[in-house]
Image (cartoon, rainbow, N blue to C red):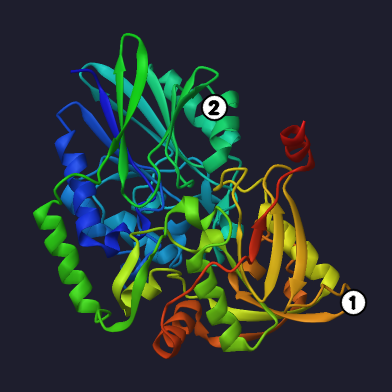
Amino acid sequence: MPARVLQYSDVENACDEPARIGRLATALQRYRDEDTVVVGTGDNTAPGVLPLVMEGRQALEFYDAVDPDLETFGNHDFDFGVDATREIVRRSPQTWLSANVRRNGGPFGSDVGVRPWTVLERDGTRVGFTGVTTPRTVSLNPMATDIDVRDPVETARAAIDDLRDEGVDYVVVCSHLGRGDDALARQVDADVVLGGHVPSARNEVVEGTLLTRPGDGGTAIVDLSFDRDGPTATIRRTTELEPHEDVCRSFETLQAETGLDEVIARVDEPLDRSETTLFGGEARLGNFVTDAYRWKTGTDVAIQNSGGLRTGTTLSGDVTVADVISLVPFEEPVAVAEVSGSTLEAIFEGAAGLDLGFAEPDWWHAQVSGAVLEWNPTDHRVVVDSVGGEPLDPDQCYRVATSDYLFHTDDEFPALDPADRVERTEACQYDVLVEYARRHGIDPAIEGRVRRLESRLESSERTE
């Protein structure tokens, strides 16, 4: 058998569903042999409900069961602070790789085993591995301010030079750069980039480098082989596999210990949580979340970034506290800003952001309540049609509710200025959703809050 790599990534809230995390464990077990290296490429400790309760330590149950070889850091692996991250690294069986995460001027976690690169030999093939994390981590994650994430291209290049000096046959970069993988592949001497950070799967060659990504939620793995013709990969779905019994049982036990299984609402018309729905325009789930924010704060408008809504299994039937928390499993309060109409218009222009490392260029990023927007996915124009049923007044002051996180990051909705924030709720986002669900149930509808428009070019081509 040729040397082989199995990649998983962005497990995130799969641990909240024992069967789903169990199927991922089954896939890794089924396709693994003695010549296989099992690799994780970030965001495998958080976010999710169990991660929130256990500060990411629930991942140790998964790691102990599947015994990975290597892992690198994603931005969410710092959700509970660097000390929690270091504890997980120390207790987990795999070797953690990072060429570009630093702390206090030195390599992060070197005292608990984090290495910039390593070489593993399988079936006579020497494969060198290094790892890089998105430099936007500190902006994306308020709990990551104690680390410094350096230029991934420069640091990966230095690690790869060391690996080539070791005489490896192939170089693999374990990456959590998202869309930055393309630039990385073009600028460094790597044979494979195992990617993450973006919830869609990928398997393609860019300028001679194989780029892969399994997608999020534990629903697929990448099966990579090295043979005489070089590396090739297959995306293998996990959804039809039988869950690993021991892993299932472990996570069922963890869930029972949280006390989050109280039923608080019922959903008769299933709520889809796929990335195509959440990033495709107005979504029923987004309407539920933003209506809850506006109800809690009494604001004119509420905004939820689509990336803050976690993908997962469709909500249907009885809905528990854990189900609701899983939608936005972050300890972030809801915050209120006061902005002019012209600023509000600039904020909404960020809903068609093209340069987010975790997203595809044509994705939509704003779920809204209290406003009607027009969006052209071809030329990315966003127009505010109305607020509260009235035309937007550029000089009027509007109160806007959203996650406090959006005032921290400059990646999403950069026009949201921390100076405009006037208050924060004592409750976290998920507390607001639980309270709203208890009082009003969960029965959102599509109401035309985000209207997709055709570009003028498309329209003219259709009439010619």
Judge depth for marks 2 and 1 and give the one in front.
1
Left/right of residue 460 with respect to residue 213 in the rendered view: right
Q: Residue at x 30, y 56 (%)?
A: 90
Q: Which numbered disc flags the more N-terminal residue, 2 or 1?
A: 2
Instruction: State the image coordinates of residue 445 (x, y, percent, origin top left).
Output: 50, 70
Viewport quadrant of the C terminus: top right
Note whether 402 is above or below 427 in the view shown: above
Viewport quadrant of the N terminus: top left
Helix, strand, or loop for circle 1? loop
- Residue 36 seen in render: yes
**For the view shown, which residue lies furthest in the right direction?**
395
Per the rendering, the mark at residue 96 is none
Helix, strand, or loop for circle 2? helix
Left/right of residue 365 with respect to residue 456 in the rendered view: left
- Residue 58 seen in render: no
Instruction: State the image coordinates of residue 20 (x, y, percent, origin top left).
Output: 24, 55
Q: Which residue is mark 1?
A: 395
Tally of numbered tags: 2
Q: Which residue is mark 2?
A: 185
At label 1, which amino acid type do we have? Asp
